[in-house]
Amino acid sequence: MSLYQTEGIVLSQTPLGENDKIITLLSPEEGLVRAVVKGARKPKSRLSAVTQPFTRASFQLSRGKSLDRVIQVSLKTSHPGILSDYAKVVCASYVSELVAELSPEKQQNREQFWFFSSVLDHLEQREDPWVVVKWTEVGLLLRAGLLPSFDECALCGGEIVQPAYFSAEAGGAVCGKCGQAKDAADWAGVQAGNLALGEQTVRAIPVSPGTLKTLEILRDSGNQCPNLTAKGQVRQEVNDVLQQCVDHALGKRLKSSLLVGSILVSPHRE
Ligand SMILES: [Zn+2]
């Protein structure tokens, strides 16, 4: 039996048979790890409580052919401040699903681990989870090399002049000169040839200067979640732009995306 020790954050769990479960861990040395927790669903299981989602712990595992096995767990934090708040649980489930999509299995990625560890700490501490979720989306896409441009036109490379648009399919923000048509559908038709997308129509949404500024701050804030909030139109546009970015990067919509969208429409407990 080959044993190894690693830090890890539990991203998700699924039942296995009658008594066991499988957890997905994010770890600094091994990236994503899928491991069986034997007996986790028996009433008196010691391992059950310390292998719940959002838990950060030191794990001892044994290597298996397809799945590893959890042998021992030494708890660091279960993030009680997330678990006691329904909105934060929804947000943590969403960012966990997103980081699982954007992290390779069995591949060292220390920076991803420490970034995500900081994401859960911020989510636990901040009053309004909106900025933490938006900072996480931008940070994960940036690290994966999948973040579109916000501060120059994706089509002409020029300065963004209003009325500006955003289109993940076009590669990011589009300036008013390139997007002269009044509505996005019209604009897409006009520009399709220039975009080298053939007959394909690209989706685009109008964006205000405040929205682009907010996206730039989120992108440039590195490992520190910025202190900002947004209301009304900017909040809605930032939500729409990042939804488009995530959908486009993954080529699908995440299951937890609809629920988190409904929670982040307006400021927390307003
Ligand atoms: Zn342009």
Image (cartoon, grey):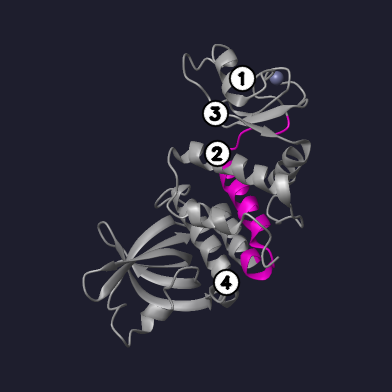
Element type where label 2 sits in the image: helix
Marks 3, 4: nearer the viewer: 3
Residue depicted at 73% across the width and 17% down the height: 177
Residue 191 visible from this viewpoint: yes
Q: Looking at the rendering, in which quadrant would you find the C terminus?
A: bottom right
The reply to whether dot 3 and dot 2 touch (C-beta < 8 Å) is yes
| Distance between the alpha carbons at the discs numbered 2 and 4 | 27 Å
Farthest bottom residue in view: 44
Give the amino acid type for the residue marked by disc 2 in the picture.
Gln
Give the amino acid type for the residue marked by disc 3 in the picture.
Arg
The residue singled out by tag 2 in the image is: 244
Residue 16 in the image: above or below residue 193: below
| Distance between the alpha carbons at the discs numbered 3 and 1 | 9 Å
The reply to whether dot 3 and dot 1 touch (C-beta < 8 Å) is no
The residue singled out by tag 1 in the image is: 187
The residue singled out by tag 4 in the image is: 82
